[in-house]
Image (spheres, rainbow, N blue to C red):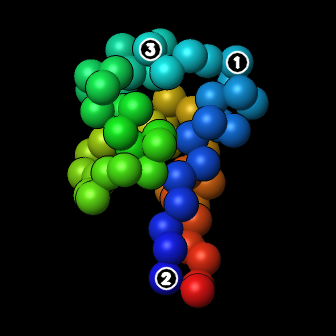
C-alpha cells in the first residue's frame, strides 16, 4: 500500500508558496518540504489540521491511499 501526498497541487490551486504555508501553519519549511515530497514517516494530526484549515480542504485532499 502507498500513501501519497498531494500538497503540490493544493498549493497551486490556492496560489500559495510552500514558505507561505509553512508560516501560516507554524512549521519549518524544511519539515513541510519533507511532507510535500512524500519522505515523511508520520504527520501529526495538529499539523494536518492546520494545513487543511489554511488550504480549506479535507485530509483526504492532502493524503491519498493507493493499494498496490
Q: Which residue is mark 1?
A: 15
Cα distance, mark 3 to mark 1?
12 Å
Question: Which secondary structure lies at badge 1?
Answer: loop
In front: 43, or 49? Answer: 43
Mark 3: secondary structure: helix
Name the N-terminal-most of marks 2 and 3: 2
Which residue is labeled 2 in the image? 1
Instruction: List the single residue furthest toward the bottom.
Output: 68
Identity of the residue drawn at 27% across and 58% down: 41
> Which mark sits nearer the N-terminus, 1 or 2?
2
* Residue nearest the viewer, comparing 24 with 31: 31
Residue 28 x, y percent position in the rendering: 27, 22
Mark 1 and mark 2: span between their CA atoms?
31 Å
Say whether residue 5 is visible: yes
Q: Which residue is mark 3?
A: 19
Q: Position of residue 67 (x, y in %)?
A: 58, 85
Label 1 with label 2: CB-CB less than 8 Å: no
Mark 2 Cα shell of 10 Å, populated few (<14), some (14-19), many (≥20): few
Whole-Å distance between the Cαs marked 2 and 3? 30 Å
Please give the name of the residue rendered at 62% of the width and 36% of the height, measured from the top-left corner.
8
Asked if disc 2 and disc 3 are in contact, CB closer than 8 Å, the reply is no
In the foreground, 32 or 68: 68
How many dots with numbers?
Answer: 3
**Quarter of the C terminus within the rendering:** bottom right
Amino acid at each position: 500500500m502507498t500513501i501519497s501526498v498531494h500538497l503540490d497541487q493544493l498549493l497551486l490551486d490556492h496560489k500559495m508558496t510552500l514558505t507561505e504555508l509553512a508560516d501560516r501553519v507554524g512549521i519549518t519549511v524544511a519539515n513541510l518540504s519533507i511532507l510535500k515530497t512524500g519522505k515523511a514517516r508520520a504527520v501529526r494530526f495538529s499539523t494536518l489540521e492546520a494545513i487543511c484549515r489554511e488550504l480549506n480542504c479535507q485530509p483526504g485532499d492532502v493524503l491519498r491511499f493507493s493499494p498496490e
